[in-house]
Image (cartoon, rainbow, N blue to C red):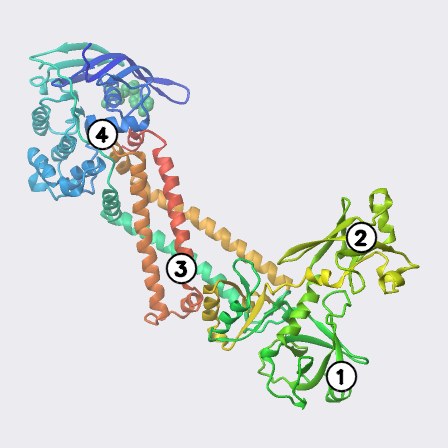
Amino acid sequence: MGKDLLELKKVSKFYYQKNTVATGFSKVDLKLNLGEFVVITGESGSGKSTLLNVLSGLDSYEEGEMYINGEETSGYTETDFENYRKKYIGNVFQSFNLVNSYTVYQNIELVLLINGFKKSEIKEKIIDVIKKVDLLKYKNTKVSKLSGGQKQRVAIARALVKDTPILIADEPTGNLDSKSASDIMNLLYEVSKGKLMILVTHNYEQVEQYATRKLTMHDGKIVEDKFLNDSKPTETVSSFAVSRPMKNTSKLRLGIRNTFNILPKFLLLLFVYIVLTLAALGGYSALKKQSYEKSKNGYNYYFLETNPKRIVIKKNDKSPFSNTDYENIRKISNVDYILEDDLLADTRFIGVSNNYAIPLSLDTLDSQPDHVDIGRMPQNEHEAILTTRDNYPSIDTIQNSILEKDFDLRSSSFSSFAYLLEYKIKIVGVTFRSSNDSSTIQNAKLYLSNDILKDLRKSLNPLRSEITIHFNGHILDSNDGIYQVVPSRTVPRGTAYAFEDFNYMAKNNNCKNKNMTIKISNLYFDDELTVKITKTFNKRNIKSVTGTDNYEIFRQAFFVNWDDYYGLFDRPSYQSSVFVKNEQEVDNTINDLNNLGFKTLYVKDALLSTNGDFDVIVNAVMMIVVLIVIVALFFLSYFIIKIILKSRNVYFSTIRILGATRKNAKQLLKIELLTVLHIAFLLVIIFCACILNNIVNIDFIYNLIVFIKFYDYIILYIALIIISLLISIRYARQLFKDSAMNTYREEV
Ligand code: ADP
Ligand code: MG
């Protein structure tokens, strides 16, 4: 059996509508080959167009078998049909299906670009084919300005330029006067030599002289199939039109051409995008402005020291700070001093002497004033000076109860009354803080060396940690104040003394010589220690076993070795604070710190408004409103853009009829939208720049956009890109859910 170029075996095509099934054509048997000039006639509605569309691969069929060059097509995917169309088919339609906003040249170029040719290699070919249809004069004329006959010539040129073996023309002269009609038929005959030409016409007499075969359709069936004249011998084809994937440069070129070639559409889209960009920018900057106004004065639950010179830092990798880290930070020129244990700045202390207690804040020696107003400067580690403000404590109190007195340090932020240092600090001098001192702390402030602050950190860490005891499947939580782990100098290392009732948690009611594990964990680190219980105590023997006699406090305590216990907590600092010299340059300092690998929190930025809860609610409502506005804006612009793009439906179905894949069409659409977006964004940026540089003077806009930083523009830019992509994806899904032909039909 010789291979036919096209063969249909009992092929049927139905149209399914709501409740009815319409027949396009049914049980058609047909063999078609090169050299044939097949003319199909029949009354309107007999199925001619449907048959052509199926043969063109523009529409699917429901029953029977269709062979292309001997290959069965029931397994063909959409892509296979796209390739078939690219390689085999040139279409000419009654309604031309040209891109009206393109020139003659561009219309013909379009089909070649879609078929993967490079712009540079096709010029001659296009000119040749334009000459062939006799339109050279109109090469650069927009198709919308041509007459019907001329338009059909362009369509024929476009069908020819790909050099496909099959030409399919559906009533190509249906819209033409009789003179142009006979010219077009003649042209079709000329260009179809050696190819398979399939032509539908109402006017058979007009083509009688060319036809080699006549098919008549009636009611979806072929009722006559007559071979005429000298039907040339059939031959099989082995080489077809070249088809490659569309070049990216061609996509870009077409996308950009499409952006601008319908000016009203471009301006409308541009307008929508500019409004979208301005609205997003406006909402965004209004929010930023509002939050800035609030940050100017405020408080924060976590930060007692809200000094605008303070930057809290952590390491990016969450590791503790090393001395090298601190050295590097000190090299930054705007850095005044570092408080290595940052949490100290936010902890309230009490200094307690024999007969006086004073609320205190702690700071590092590095920030200590260089003179005292009363008393003297310290001479060793354990001597310190105080700074005070607002005449508190009074000079009398200072002289009688503070100067040259020894003080213990306690924490007042934690419920525990533990002494924090094993030694006393002697206060030897007092400086009155000036009103331009930038510290926001009201308390008296005590300045201690970094070594002492380190000791303090070690003893504060247990207060900031969760401590649990794990034993025989039990987990005891020491933070609820019932169970305690108590460091003791009398307990040997690696061991623990437990309260007697603890026996009940052990197997055989005996905990002695069994191991228990103390686990600690806090924001920054975890650790654990396993110790052996060697002794138990009760009310009677607590003094002799542990050395303390306060049974009421320690009745449920575990005593462990002092060094074992503090060994768990003896860590370098994980969070420090940098204080800058010049507050105005804090942004640069933050940048420098980030570049060194530190995470920063500028305390001033983290402040809450002093108006309290009400403001938190207002803020949340504002955020929600802005969010709703943005979402509404998105849908609004989506619908507007969709309406604008509706005029593009014909374009996109046309390029699909010419062989563009769904994906190509989507990409072209994306390029078009993104191009408009970029222009809109650029215009808005230029506008903002003009306002910021006082080239244009609009105060209220100026006051809004000064708050927008470079990275805000980037965020906005990315958001707009995402919106554009979402719109093009949604639009493309709607546009392309149907076959190319259906979309086209609905539009024309
Ligand atoms: P012709 O081109 O010979 O005038 P068509 O091929 O357009 O005829 O139509 C053949 C039959 O299929 C007609 O009965 C027509 O109503 C039906 N038909 C064509 N296109 C559709 C469609 N998209 N949906 C439903 N029915 C259709
Ligand atoms: Mg028709």
Residue 177 in picture, x, y percent from top left: 11, 29
Distance from mark 4 CB to nearest ligand 1 atom below 8 Å: no
Q: CA distance from mark 3 to mark 2?
A: 63 Å
Q: Secondary structure at mark 3?
A: helix
Query: Which of the two labelled residues, at mark 4 and mark 1, occupies the earlier sequence position?
Result: 4
Q: Nearer the viewer, residue 56 or 426?
A: 426
Q: What residue is shown with label 3?
A: 713
The quarter of the displayed image where residue 183 is located? top left
Lower position in the chain sequence, tag 3 or tag 4: 4
Identify whether 423 is placed above or below 224: below
4 or 2: mark nearer the eye: 2
The x and y percentages for residue 625 are 52, 54
Residue type at numbered disc 4 = Lys
Sequence order check, earlier mark of 4 and 2 = 4
Q: Name the mark nearer the viewer: 4 or 1.
A: 1
Badge 2 element: strand
| Residue depicted at 8% across the width and 33% down the height | 133
Type of residue at label 3? Tyr
Q: Tell me if 714 is positioned left or right of 148 in this view.
A: right
Q: Which residue is mark 2?
A: 533
Q: Which amino acid type is marked by label 1?
A: Lys
Judge left or right: residue 138 versus residue 302.
Answer: left
How far apart, in angstroms, are the residues tagged by discs 3 and 4? 44 Å
| Label 3 with label 2: CB-CB less than 8 Å | no
Mark 1 = which residue?
405
Pointer 4: what residue? 86
